[in-house]
Structure formats: structure tokens, C-alpha cells
Image (spheres, rainbow, N blue to C red):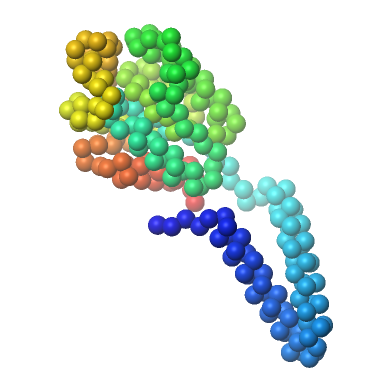
Amino acid sequence: MFRETNLRYIAKGVSWRFVATTTTIVIVYIFFGRLDLAIVAGLIETILKIVLYWLHEKIWQRVRWGKERIEPFNIWLTGLPLSGKTTIGDLVYKKLQKYQIPIERLDSKDIRELIPSLGYGREDRYRHMIRVGHLIKTLQKNSISIVASFVSPYEESREIIKRMTKNSVIVYIKADIKSCQKRDYKGVYKKALSGELKNFSGVNDIYEEPKNANIVIDTNILSPEEASDIIVNYIKKRYIKE
């Protein structure tokens, strides 16, 4: 699959303008038999059409008829640590950017760096979700949609996000502990199993599977690319509506 660059768009526009102007010159020459008149007519036509097109676009920008506002949505990817949330979330974000809608990417590790003093106990996680919910709510007020990936292990914290934000789509990235351990390039599961890390979801703290997830992605069956396509298609049908 190929994507057209801005330079290619410009080249196509210039080539089309050349074809249109040449056509005008040829037609005038055929009817009047004067090359100088044909060239002048072609140049005048080119300048006038550029100006008229600019005015035409300016007028249509002010007309609201036919415009359909895309309601901001919040894609919330939840799952065990190293289940594949970040990888899939990044792919979803890149694919949705192609539709030229205002969209931002939030990942738990980035937000945690802003609040390093916050712990991982149930109450701390709940407070953390409220802060994240306020952030998403603020972004959505500015018509910005979100792709967020957080472990969010407790049902009540995910419910808080749904209540605080608009059009939340809960995506459960399902993976068993063994699969997550295979991806453990950080060694965090080993630390949790040894007791070095406390409140680690799925090892020494509970992970409550979402009861009412909008989408369930089984990473033992689907690749990140396939998973991202499922999520993007879901969003397209409900919110983008091409």
C-alpha cells in the first residue's frame, strides 16, 4: 500500500494546470488561427481560474451546510502488563491519523513519568484514573480524540473513565501470563514473582477482566496489525463514517 506525498499532490496539480491551459491555447488557435492570441487567452484563463478557485474555497469554508462534525472518541486499551497494548495502540493511532482528525496518543508510561510519586495500590490507581479522565475530558472539549493504553486493572477505574469521557470504546487486549512473560524484555515479571515489585497486576495483584468491553482482542490469535485493523474499522463505522 502506498501513500501519496504532498510533493506528488503539487506535481499533479501543476501537470493538470498545464494540460488545461494547453487545451485552452489549442482551442483558441483552432478557432482564430492566431498563436499570440491563443497564448494570451491561456495565461489569462490560468490566472483567473487560480483566483476564482481561491475565492470559491473561501466561500465554501464559511458555509456550514454539508459539514458533519466528528464527535471526539476515547479508545481505551486495557490488559495485563506487556499484553501488547502499547504496540497495538501505536498502530491504531498511526492509522487514524490518516483520516486527518484531531487525535492524541496517551500511554501509561508517559503519564506516570509526569506523576512519579503516585503508587500502584488500589487507591492510588483510582486517583490516577481520575487525573487521566480529567486530561481526556479537557482534550475532548477541544474536539480531540484519544488513543489510550493503560493496564487499568480494576473495573471501577475503567467505569470512571467511561463516565468522565465521551464515546469511550473499551478494548480488552487479552493475553495470558505466559505470553506476557515471553515479551518481558524489561524483566518486570521476574521482579514481581520474586517479590521485588509489589502490586503488579496479574502476579501479586488482581487484574479484573472487563465485563462489558466493546472489543476483545486475543493476542494469541491476532497479530498487532490485525488487531489494529479491527479497532480502526470499529471507529470508522461509528464515528468517522466515511
Compared to residue 34, the image places residue 99 above or below, namely: above
Q: Residue furthest left?
A: 178
Residue at (78, 86) in percent of width and height? 35
Q: Looking at the figure, which quarter contains the N terminus?
A: bottom left
Q: Please identify the quarter of the rendering in which residue 113 is found.
A: top left
Give how far across and how far down residue 208 sits, in percent: 27, 20
Q: How many marks?
A: 0
Q: Residue furthest front?
A: 186
Compared to residue 119, the image places residue 240 above or below, namely: below
Q: Please identify the quarter of the rendering in which residue 180 is found.
A: top left
Q: Is residue 73 left or right of residue 68?
A: left
| Pick the front one: 213 or 29 | 29
Compared to residue 143, the image places residue 129 above or below, namely: above
Give how far across and how far down residue 85 sits, in percent: 34, 32
Residue at (75, 66) in percent of width and height? 49
Give how far across and how far down residue 24 sits, in percent: 72, 79
Q: Is residue 60 left or right of residue 197?
A: right
- Residue 63 visible in the displayed image: no
Compared to residue 191, the image places residue 174 above or below, namely: below
Give how far across and how far down residue 62 sits, in percent: 72, 48
- Residue 189 visible in the displayed image: yes
Q: Please identify the quarter of the rendering in which residue 44 is found.
A: bottom right
Residue at (25, 42) in percent of width and height? 222
| Pick the front one: 191 or 121 | 191
Residue at (78, 66) in percent of width and height? 47
